[in-house]
Image (cartoon, rainbow, N blue to C red):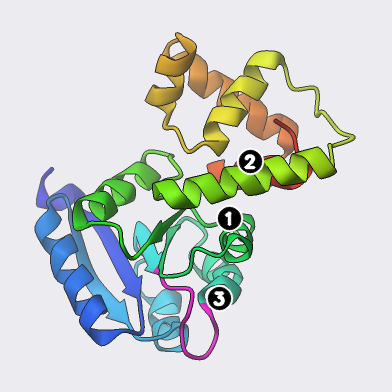
Amino acid sequence: MTAQVQLTVWLIEDNDAYRASVTRAIDRAGGMTCPRSFHSFEQALPALGTHPHPDVLLLDVGLPGLDGISAMERIRELCPGVKILILTVFDDPQKIFAAICAGASGYLLKTASITELADAIRQVMEGGAPMTPRVAKLVLERFSSIASRQPSALNYSLTSRERDVLELMVRGLLKKEIAGELGVSVHTVITHIRRVYEKLQVTTNTAAVSKAIREGLV
């Protein structure tokens, strides 16, 4: 990947040593750069409002001042196209679920390796919803619990294949992985995803996943 098409990543993280380590690692990962990092949402706010927006924003949950999850609504208002990747020590199911419902594109624990982090950044840009295995397990358990307790009265007229695609989206698979799982072309998957978006009245992968989890659609 050339410098002209490098992904731009910003980081909001209050641990100075970890912030510096992640910044260096991203700059060395290839195909991406982290030109700006911040100690808090309040420190990042002027840049979010005035600078060209990043492709991906790495966001800690336990920030001083406004916490990461509470800050997400404001971030999405200022940078509607940015992919927000939660990077935190918290693996509490409530926090994970809250972050996904707030529009996070992925949720990684800080125990993730630098290779896993770089891969996750690439995945969100391809439309995936990367999560560390433990987080994915907690999300699916939470999803199963909600689905069993509160089955949706709405089906949005999803076809069985659209439900299959939506379920795989909830599991965090990329378009090409969904295609391989279902034995269809990527083009067919894209068509199904577009129809899922239309029927659920959403415009992003995370919004579709969030709605599916909240309403027990799959």
**On the image, numbered disc 1 is attached to which residue?**
100
Marking on residue 123: none
Quarter-of-image position of residue 179: top left
Report whether 32 appears left or right of 157. left
Q: Residue furthest top?
A: 183
Crowding around mark 2 (Cα neighbors within 10 Å: few <14, some 14 to 19, many 20+) is: many
Give whichever of discs 3 and 1 has the lower sequence position.
3
| Residue shown at 15% from the left, 64% from the top | 25
Type of the residue with mark 2: Ala
| Residue shown at 47% from the left, 38% from the top | 172
Report whether 7 appears left or right of 24. right
Please state which of residues 198 and 183 is positioned toward the viewer in this rendering: 183
Distance between the Cα atoms at labels 3 and 1? Answer: 13 Å
SS label for mark 3: helix
| Residue shown at 47% from the left, 89% from the top | 64
Q: Position of residue 161 (x, y in %)?
A: 63, 15
Q: Magenta part of the protein: which range?
A: 59-67
Marking on residue 208: 2
Quadrant where the N terminus is found in the figure:
top left
Distance between the Cα atoms at labels 2 and 1? Answer: 10 Å
Crowding around mark 3 (Cα neighbors within 10 Å: few <14, some 14 to 19, many 20+) is: some
